[in-house]
Amino acid sequence: MAAVSLNNVVKKFGSLPVVHGASLEIADGEFVVFVGPSGCGKSTLLRMIAGLEDITDGEIVIGGKVVNDVEPAERGIAMVFQSYALYPHMTVEQNLSFGLRMTGNDKADTQRRVSRAADILRISELMQRRPRQLSGGQRQRVAIGRAIVRNPQVFLFDEPLSNLDAELRVQMRVEIARLHKELGVTMIYVTHDQTEAMTLADKIVVLRAGNIEQIGRPLDLYYDPDNQFVAGFVGSPKMNFIRGHVVERNDKGVILELAGEDGTRLAQPLTGPAPELGSHVTVGVRPEHFGDAGKGDADLTVSVDVVEHLGGTSFVYAATAAGEELVIQRDAATAADAAEITVSIRKSYLFDEKGLRLR
Amino acid sequence: MRSKSSAERRRGIALHAALFPLALIWLFPLWMMFVFSTLPENGIFSRDIILTPSDQFVENFNLLESDTGFIRATTISILVAAAYTVLSVALTSMAGWSLACYRFAGKGVVLATILGTLTLPYFVVVIPQFIMVARDFGLHNTLFALIVPPLFNSLGVLFMRQTFSMMPHELFDAARVEGVKEWRIFLFIGLPLARPAVAALSIILFLHSWNNYLWPLLINSKPAMMTAPVALGSLIGLTKVSWGGIMTGAVMLTAPMLVLFVALQRHFVAGISAGAVK
C-alpha cells in the first residue's frame, strides 16, 4: 500500500500541452476517481502514473519515492485496461501468470498467487479457457486478476467498465468496491461516467482540458461545486442552468432577474464579493430542487416537452420562456403542457460570467 | 442453413462457366510441363501435339542428374531457402516491430528510406551488390553470399509493421506494466499474434529464394555451388538445349511449392487479408 503525490505534473505531446500542471495528494488506501469528458487528459494522467508515458515536467511520488524515471514494473503498480488487454493466445491461467513467469518469479509462489486471485474473483473454473471463450464480465475479472497477482501498492483502472452492458457494469462496479474493501490498497480509477465516480470514490478529481477543476468527496462536489463545469458534470440528470443578470446589489448580496422572466426576481445572498450591476450570471438548480409554485423564492412558468416516468420518480423535460431547457424531477408528474415551478435560494447556485461559483 | 435460391444457383453456374476455361488456360502450361517431363526428346519435338504423359520421367531425371548434379543443387536450394526464410522473417519482423511500437528520432526518415527502396528496380541494385560481395568482401561461391545479401526485404518490413500496428497496443502496455522485457513482449505476444502474417510472409520469402535465378547465377561460378534454378539454366547450352531435363527439373521444383502453397493457403489468405475487415 502506498500514497501517491503528483506535484505540478505537465505533459506535452510535441508542443501540444495536454496536462497543465496537475497537483494532487492521494492517501494510502484511498479510492480516487479521475473523471471528465473525453480528451480531458485523465487517461494520460493515469498512464503517466503507470510510467507508460513520460512526464514533461513535475514530479510523481509513489510510496515516498520519486518515480519519474522508474520503469512501470518497478513502481509497484498494476493496471487494468479499458479493452481488458488479455493475451488472446493464452489461457486464463497463463494470462494471470504471464508477468510473473516472464520475470523469473518462483514457480510455487506464482501458482499460489494465481490461485488466490482466482479465488478472490471467483474465476477458478475458467482457468483453462481462452479469452474468446469468456463473457465480457469474466474477461474483466481476469484482467483484474492479472493486476491482483502482482500484489501492487497501487491499482490503476483505465475506464474498465466502459465495454460492458449496463447491467454488468453495475455488477462489476459493486465487485470493484468489494475488492477495494477487501484488499485495502490505493486505487486510482479513470472514467467519464460520473455515476461510477460518485458510487466508487472516496475522492473525485474532476478534469477538464488538462486542468484539475476540483478535488473532493463525491457529495462535496455534488452539493458544493466550485464552478459551473463541475456543477454540470457531477449529478445525473445534470444541473439546470438559467441565465440572468444582476439588477441590484446590496450588502447582503444581489438581486437577479432571470432571462425571459420579466419581473421575476431572485434575491441571492452572498458572503463573498458580489458581481457588478448588470453583469450576466447563471443560476444552477438541480432537477430535484425545483419546488411547487408559491413555495419558493421565484416562480417560473415552463412549457413541458416530455415526461419520463421511471416508477419511483419522473423527469419532466421542459423549457423556460427564454428557451432554456430544464429537467425537473418530480415524485409524480402528468404530461401537462405548462407547469408552474419554483426556484429556492437555499437550493440554488450562482455562477459568474466565467463560470466560477459566487458564494 | 438456408437453401440457395435459383437466382443464386444460376449466378454460380455462370461464374463457373466463365472461370473454368480461364482455369484451363492457366493450368495448360503446367500440364504440358508435366507431359514434356515424361516424353523422350523426340516426343517433345514430334509434329503431333502430345497431351498425355508417357513413361520417360525417370530416364529424363537420370539425364538431368548426370548433367547438372540436380539432387545436390536442390539440396543447396532447400538449405538456402530455409535459412533465408527463417533469417529474413526474423529480421523483417524485428524491423517491423520497432517501426510499429517505438517512438524514436528519425523514424519517419527510416520508414521513407525503406519505402523508397521499393521503387528501385532489382537490376539497379544487383550489380553494385555483386561488386561489393564478390570483389570487396571476396565472398563469392559461399552459402553466406547466397543467403545474406538478399535478406533485407522492404516489403516484408512494411508488411510486418502494418501487422503489428493493427494490434491493440494495450496488450504490450499490459506486459510492460508487468515488467516483461521488450524482446520477450515481441517474442511471446507480438509474434504469436502475428502468426498468420508470419506464415504468409514465410511462403512469399521461401518462394522468392526458391525461384531466385539471377543472384545465385552471378555470385556462384562453381558448379558445386549451383542452386536448382541455376542448374536448370545450365542445360541451355550454345549448341544443345536439354528440354526433357529442363521440364523434369521444373516439375520437381514446382510440385513441392504447389503442395506447400495449398497446405498453407488458409494461413496465407488470412495473413494477407488480416485487418481488411474488422
Image (spheres, coloured by chain):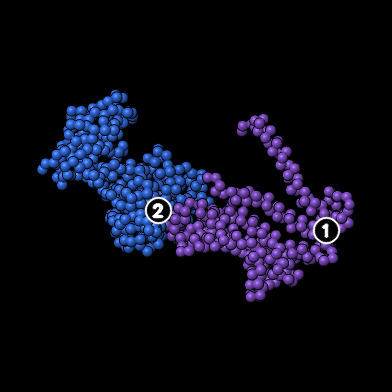
- In the displayed structure image, the side of residue B102 where residue B91 appears, left or right: right
Residue at x 67% of width, y 52% of height: B261
Residues A73 and B266: in front is B266
Picture quadrant where residue B254 is located: bottom right
Question: Disc 1 designates what residue?
Answer: B244
Question: Disc 2 designates what residue?
Answer: A79
Residue at x 26% of width, y 43% of height: A228
Q: Amino acid at mark 1?
A: Gly
Kind of element beneath mark 1 = helix
Image colour for chain A is blue
Residues A69 and A297: in front is A297
Give the residue furthest to the front: A278
Q: CA distance from mark 2 to mark 1?
A: 67 Å
Please provide percent x and percent y for residue B167: 50, 52
- In the displayed structure image, the side of residue A239 where residue A359 appears, left or right: left
Please provide percent x and percent y for residue B67: 81, 66
- In the displayed structure image, the side of residue A148 where residue B49 appears, left or right: right
Q: Amino acid at mark 2?
A: Met
Q: Nearer the viewer, mark 2 or mark 1?
A: 1
Image quarter hosting the N terminus of chain A = bottom left
Image colour for chain B is purple
Picture quadrant where residue A345 is located: top left
Residue at x 62% of width, y 49% of height: B269
Residue at x 47% of width, y 50% of height: A86
Mark 1 burial class by Cα count in 10 Å: few <14, some 14-19, many 20+: many
Image quarter hosting the C terminus of chain A = top left
Whether residue A329 is visible here, answered yes or no, is no
The reply to whether label 2 and label 1 mark residues of one chain is no
Whether residue B33 is visible here, answered yes or no, is yes
Please provide percent x and percent y for residue B255: 74, 54
